[in-house]
Image: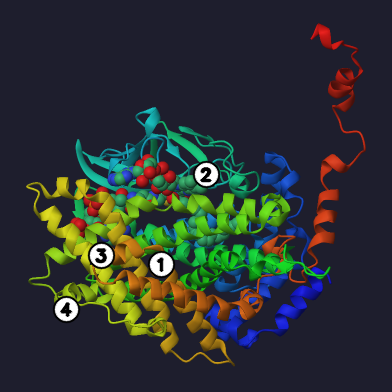
Amino acid sequence: MEGVDYLRDERKKSEFDVEAMKVAWAGSREAFQVSDRMAKLVANDPVFEKFSKPTLGRKEMFKNTLRKAAYAWKLINDLHLTEEEAKWLRHYIDEPNYTDLQWEMFVPALEGQGSEEQKRKWLPLAQTMQIIGTYAQTELAHGSNVQGLETTATFDHETDQFVIHSPTLTSSKWWPGGMAKVATHAIVYARLIIDGHFYGVHGFIVQLRSLEDHSTLPGITVGDIGMKFGHGAYNTMDNGVLRFDRVRIPRNQMLMRVSQVTKEGKYVQSDVPRQLAYGTMVSVRQTIVSDASKALSRAVCIATRYSAIRRQFGSHDGGPETQVIDYKTQQSRLFPLLASAFAFRFVSEWLKSLQTDVKQRLEAKDFSTLPEAHACTAGLKSLTTAATADGIEECRKLCGGHGYLISSGLPELYAYYVPACTYEGENVVMMLQVARFLVKTVSEMSYKQPVGTADYLGRMAPLMHNNCDVQTAEDWLNPSAIVKAFETRAVRMIVDCSQRIAKFENQEEGFAELSTDLVEASLAHCQLIVVSTFIQRLKQEIPGKGVKQSLEVLCYVYALYLLHKHQGDFLATGYLTSKQASLANDQLKTLYSKVRPNAIALVDSFNHTDHYLSSVLGRYDGNVYPKLYEAARKDPLNDSDIADGINQYVQPILKQKLHLAKL
Ligand SMILES: CC/C=C\C/C=C\C/C=C\C/C=C\C/C=C\C/C=C\C=C\C(=O)SCCNC(=O)CCNC(=O)[C@H](O)C(C)(C)COP(=O)(O)OP(=O)(O)OC[C@H]1O[C@@H](n2cnc3c(N)ncnc32)[C@H](O)[C@@H]1OP(=O)(O)O
Ligand SMILES: Cc1cc2nc3c(=O)[nH]c(=O)nc-3n(C[C@H](O)[C@H](O)[C@H](O)COP(=O)(O)OP(=O)(O)OC[C@H]3O[C@@H](n4cnc5c(N)ncnc54)[C@H](O)[C@@H]3O)c2cc1C
């Protein structure tokens, strides 16, 4: 039997309707259709071929990406694609490039932070790509601490302009995507100075390059920051360095939704919180959570298919060896990641609806849910990206030696994905933001009832004193037992930190001293959100034979895997006995055996094309070994029998007639 037959047999074992599961994964039939159509459009167009990328040099790779982006833009216009379709098209092209910044950051920054007048002027230019923009916030010496940025924007009364300046080397903008070679404009974050007074960091629209010949404008020095981790991955993107030498822009190019500077040089803070200036980061963090489920599902799909094809040991009487997916150790590493992909998918959907709700409230000048939205996006961004980056690497290991080959698709995926733990808010810094929110919520509880994702803190009294009543492994198959365990763990960890901080005379000092515990407490809170969201999703109607049942199994796998992994927390907070923790682990093993027959069908439900996976190991048809061989044959080193350099550097060594004694 060949891999092709193995996967065919695996698909026959499925206990649920795969087509219906595809819809559940996508969110709706319409969402599935749009994503499916765009995936096929990209997969079937030779312009979007990816297999030659690993052999290209930086310049060729960059140019090739520009070519694809230009062609994609043509398709978007020729085919009159909707915004949603265009988003999926870019996603499936699967090469970071300047358009990510244009659509994910530049346009949202204009939308979220521009005044109505500014939006009327700049949005049509950006939306039709007459200008190409980037988001220039981070500096050489300042990233996480936005208030610490050094670039200055000084108001000049006489000319009614701002003077944008990089006073030091360390104030150079450093990292913005698309900035080195492509962007014509940037939203530059700089400290506002009026008459010698500082008014905090604000965004300014600054033109970097001529719209005539693309040359850099006077006063602007811009370039690429150099190669990044991994070969292909992020090196298709021209992350840039940018310095300003007293560049002048009109006053009306400061983004003026949150605060304004008048012609007279008066700083006017409108009635919206200053944190709205961070709104672009909040909305991108939500996108990043959604991206995490895509990246993790991609790695899991590859590792699961390959695990069903790969066989090692266990052959009896000359029969086939055991499929590695049947080893309990393989299952215990792989299936929690499969479950996590679904968990992240559902929590990202929920986060999107939370964002929509916050946006509507902001329009109505209701800012009450902003802190919670910030904590949720920051915390879930941190949780999902960390788990996804680790998960991709685990999937590489699950594929043994072949996982290390570029043709497995996993090394490049990891290299592309891992900076997600850093960009848009470094993960630990983000968890500390969650901790601030939680500690504040606890401190305000005497006069303010916690709501939303923090509402369980309002049930502190019972949660602080309850004990778990699970007696058998089956008792863990109960959503309320699970939610209660996660709520209790989170509440106790948060309260413990809060009480210890309260003992410090200086609360900030206490916060800093306890920061490692606070990060763990924040993680517990975020895991509770993911687990509860999964459970809530299962309360909705989910059509299709066996679909809901399969998702229920995955939901329990996700929750009990976390419980097992963090059992130290659950035991230390005194909610569980070691016997109950061990029962959870027993149940987890039983659940793995329920996932096993459905594993291939579950990864098929992601509906990933072979083009998107770009993995010989993860091929839909399972024809792994012949295609691995074929991919290896195509390596440039195999172009000739005698490689360049052999005659020059190896032959002379082979031909020298040295005697051992002379060595
Ligand atoms: C192969 C694949 C191919 C293609 C990929 C295709 C598509 C990609 C798809 C999806 C991904 C999309 C995009 C990403 C893609 C690529 C990456 C590209 C770009 C990356 C860009 C960047 O990284 S931009 C730079 C990001 N920088 C940061 O995130 C900086 C982080 N720092 C901060 O946010 C802040 O400095 C801070 C929050 C840490 C602290 O701020 P500060 O002002 O000092 O605040 P505090 O004094 O601590 O707090 C004051 C109060 O304000 C509250 N607060 C803080 N932030 C917010 C907020 N955002 N909203 C609301 N409230 C906020 C804070 O809690 C405090 O509240 P109190 O009540 O305690 O007072
Ligand atoms: C691929 C990529 C693309 C990017 N694209 C852009 C872009 O388009 N535009 C843009 O403006 N920026 C961009 N960035 C920059 C990115 O946003 C920053 O790198 C990020 O915000 C982290 O900041 P930093 O580099 O200053 O890290 P640092 O904050 O210096 O982090 C270094 C270490 O210090 C720790 N640390 C920092 N502060 C604290 C604290 N208060 N408490 C405890 N520990 C702390 C962190 O946990 C981390 O371990 C990009 C970065 C990458 C990697």
Q: Position of residue 361 (x, y in %)?
A: 28, 75
Nearest to viewer (mark 3 / mark 1): 1
Gap in angstroms between the C-alphas marked 3 and 2: 31 Å
Q: Which amino acid type is shown beneath numbered disc 3? A: Pro
Measure the alpha-carbon separation of dots 1 and 2. 45 Å
Q: Secondary structure at mark 4?
A: helix
Task: Tell whether 20 sits left or right of 154.
Answer: right
Q: Residue at x 64, y 84 (%)?
A: 18
Relative image position of residue 544 (x, y in whole percent)? 58, 92
Which comes sooner in the sequence, label 4 or label 2? 2
Of the residues under marks 3 and 2, which one precedes in the sequence?
2
Residue 179's mark? 2
- Kindly indicate whether the residue at mark 1 contacts the one at mark 3 (C-beta within 8 angstroms): no
Where is 570 relative to 601, above or below?
Answer: above
Q: Nearer the viewer, mark 1 or mark 4?
A: 1
Marks 4 and 3, how far apart in space? 26 Å
Q: Nearer the viewer, mark 3 or mark 2?
A: 3
- Secondary structure category for the residue under label 3: helix
Q: Which residue is mark 4?
A: 462
In-front residue for pair 636/283: 636
